[in-house]
Image (cartoon, helix red, strand yellow):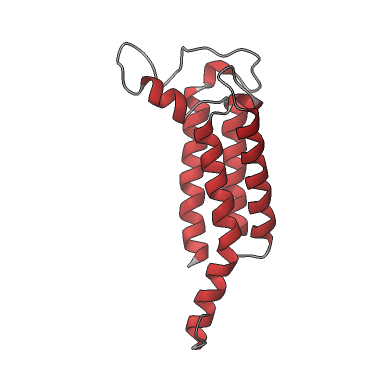
C-alpha cells in the first residue's frame, strides 16, 4: 500500500514543482529579485491572482527542489530510508518557515511550499509504519 500511495504522492509533488517552475520562469533559477509578470498566472483577471502567488510562489530552483523531493518519495516510500528523507524534508520546511517574510527568502518560498514539504516529510516518516501494518495484516498478525 505504501508504495502505491508513495507514487501518488510523488506525482502530486512533481506536478506542484513543475507548475511552480512554469509560473516562475521569469524569476529564473536563483533570483535576487522577483517579478509579478508570471508566465502562467496573472493578467487582467483577479483569479488566481494573489491565491496563485501564495500557492506557487518561488523560483525555478524551488520547483527543482520539489521535483527532487518527488523522486525521493517515489524511491524511498515505505522503506527505512524514508524516515531519514522525511526528517530532512521537515527540517527544510522548518527553515523555510523561519526564513519567511514578505520580501522573499530561500528561493522565495512562501508558507504554501513549506506546508507541502512538511506534509511530504510527515508522509515519509509514517510510510514505513504503514508498510509494516499492511505486512502484518497479510500474515494474520493483529496490529497493536
Is the residue 47 above or below the residue 78 in the image?
Answer: above
* Whole-percent x, y for residue 91 in the image: 67, 44
Q: Quadrant of residue 64?
A: top right
Residue 77 in view here: no
Residue name at image x 62 percent, y 37 percent:
65
Camera-side residue of 95 and 47: 95
Residue at point 31% right, 11% down?
44
Is 95 situated above or below 126?
Answer: above
In the rendered image, residue 8, in percent from the top left (x then y), is placed at: 46, 54
| Left or right side of 44 for 118 | right
Identify the residue at the far bottom of this view. 140
> How many marks are shown on the rendered structure?
0
The residue located at (57%, 74%) in the rendering is: 132
Question: In the image, what residue occupies the spot 55% across and 70% down?
Answer: 131
Q: Is residue 43 above or below residue 79?
A: above
Asked if residue 31 shows in the view, the reply is yes
Q: Tell me residue 24's x, y (percent).
A: 52, 22
In percent of width and height, residue 26 lies at: 53, 16
Amino acid at each position: 500500500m505504501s508504495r502505491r500511495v508513495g507514487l501518488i504522492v510523488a506525482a502530486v509533488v512533481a506536478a506542484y514543482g513543475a507548475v511552480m517552475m512554469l509560473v516562475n520562469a521569469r524569476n529564473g533559477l536563483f533570483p535576487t529579485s522577483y517579478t509579478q509578470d508570471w508566465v502562467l498566472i496573472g493578467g487582467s483577471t483577479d483569479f488566481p491572482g494573489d491565491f496563485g502567488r501564495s500557492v506557487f510562489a518561488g523560483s525555478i530552483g524551488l520547483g527543482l527542489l520539489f521535483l527532487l523531493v518527488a523522486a525521493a518519495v517515489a524511491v524511498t516510500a515505505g522503506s527505512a530510508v524514508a524516515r531519514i528523507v522525511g526528517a530532512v524534508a521537515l527540517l527544510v520546511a522548518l527553515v523555510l518557515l523561519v526564513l519567511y517574510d514578505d520580501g522573499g527568502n530561500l528561493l522565495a518560498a512562501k508558507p504554501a511550499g513549506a506546508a507541502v514539504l512538511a506534509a511530504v516529510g510527515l508522509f515519509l516518516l509514517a510510510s514505513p509504519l504503514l508498510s509494516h501494518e499492511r505486512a502484518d495484516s497479510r500474515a494474520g498478525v493483529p496490529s497493536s
